[in-house]
Image: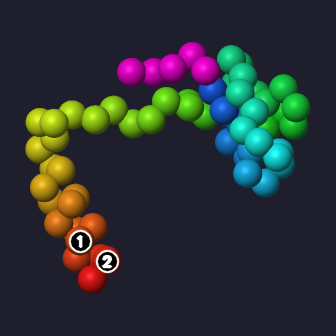
Protein backbone atom coordinates (compact mmCIF):
# COMPACT_ATOMS: atom_id res chain seq x y z
CA UNK A 1 0.00 0.00 0.00
CA UNK A 2 1.40 3.35 -0.97
CA UNK A 3 0.18 6.54 0.63
CA UNK A 4 -0.20 9.84 -1.22
CA UNK A 5 0.79 11.68 1.96
CA UNK A 6 4.53 12.15 2.27
CA UNK A 7 6.69 13.44 5.13
CA UNK A 8 9.88 15.52 4.95
CA UNK A 9 12.85 13.15 5.04
CA UNK A 10 14.89 15.65 7.09
CA UNK A 11 12.20 16.65 9.56
CA UNK A 12 14.15 15.55 12.65
CA UNK A 13 17.03 17.89 11.89
CA UNK A 14 15.28 20.70 9.99
CA UNK A 15 11.90 21.07 11.76
CA UNK A 16 10.34 20.99 15.24
CA UNK A 17 7.68 18.52 14.10
CA UNK A 18 6.99 16.33 11.06
CA UNK A 19 6.05 18.32 7.96
CA UNK A 20 3.65 16.52 5.63
CA UNK A 21 3.22 17.21 1.91
CA UNK A 22 1.65 15.73 -1.19
CA UNK A 23 4.59 16.49 -3.50
CA UNK A 24 8.17 15.30 -3.83
CA UNK A 25 9.65 18.34 -2.03
CA UNK A 26 9.05 19.72 1.47
CA UNK A 27 7.10 23.01 1.31
CA UNK A 28 9.11 24.55 4.15
CA UNK A 29 12.75 23.52 3.56
CA UNK A 30 12.55 22.26 -0.06
CA UNK A 31 14.10 18.97 1.03
CA UNK A 32 13.05 15.56 -0.30
CA UNK A 33 9.97 13.79 1.03
CA UNK A 34 9.39 10.09 1.65
CA UNK A 35 6.36 7.84 1.95
CA UNK A 36 4.75 8.21 5.38
CA UNK A 37 2.94 4.85 5.39
CA UNK A 38 4.44 2.02 7.46
CA UNK A 39 5.84 -1.03 5.69
CA UNK A 40 3.22 -3.65 4.86
CA UNK A 41 2.82 -6.57 7.24
CA UNK A 42 1.87 -10.07 6.17
CA UNK A 43 1.24 -12.95 8.59
CA UNK A 44 2.46 -15.32 5.87
CA UNK A 45 5.88 -13.60 5.78
CA UNK A 46 8.25 -16.40 4.69
CA UNK A 47 11.31 -14.73 6.29
CA UNK A 48 9.69 -13.47 9.51
CA UNK A 49 10.95 -16.38 11.60
CA UNK A 50 14.55 -15.77 10.52
CA UNK A 51 14.27 -12.01 11.11
CA UNK A 52 12.88 -12.52 14.63
CA UNK A 53 15.57 -15.10 15.41
CA UNK A 54 18.32 -12.69 14.25
CA UNK A 55 16.80 -9.86 16.32
CA UNK A 56 16.75 -12.06 19.44
CA UNK A 57 20.34 -13.13 18.82
CA UNK A 58 21.47 -9.50 18.42
CA UNK A 59 19.81 -8.38 21.66
CA UNK A 60 21.50 -11.09 23.75
Q: Are marks 1 and 2 in contact (CB under 8 Å)?
A: yes
Q: For the stretch drawn in magenta, what is the main secondary structure?
A: loop
Name the residue that disc number 2 marks.
Answer: 59
**x then y, percent, for residue 11:** 74, 45
Question: How many numbered discs, if any?
Answer: 2
Question: Is 53 on the left or on the right of 37, as rendered?
Answer: left
Residue 26 sits in quarter: top right
Give the vertical position of 35 relative to 12 (above or below): above
Cα–Cα span, label 1 and label 2: 5 Å
- Which image quarter holds the N terminus? top left
Q: Secondary structure at mark 1?
A: helix
Q: Residue at x 56, y 30 (%)?
A: 35
Residue found at x 73% / y 51% = 12
Q: Which label sits on residue 8? A: none
On the image, the x and y values in percent for residue 54 come to 22, 68
Q: Where does the magenta region start and end?
A: 1-5
How would you rate the neighbour count of disc 2 (Cα within 10 Å): few for under 14, some for 14-19, many for 20 or more?
few
Figure quadrant of the C terminus: bottom left
Q: Quadrant of residue 45?
A: top left
User: Which of the 4 image quarters holds residue 43?
Assistant: top left
Foreground of the two, 8 or 17 = 17
Crowding at mark 1 (Cα within 10 Å: few <14, some 14-19, many 20+) = few
Residue 15's spot in the image, x, y percent?
83, 45
Q: Which residue, as the protein is rendered here, is positioned at the far bottom?
A: 60
Residue 22 in the magenta stretch? The answer is no
**Residue name at image x 30 percent, y 76 percent:** 58
Q: Position of residue 7 (x, y in %)?
A: 66, 32
Relative vertical location of residue 41 with respect to residue 48 in this rendering, above or below: above
Horizontal side, residue 23 vs residue 51: left or right? right
The residue wearing badge 1 is 56
Residue 22 in sight in this render = yes
Amino acid sequence: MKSDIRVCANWETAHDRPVYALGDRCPECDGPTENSAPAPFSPEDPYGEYRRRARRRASE
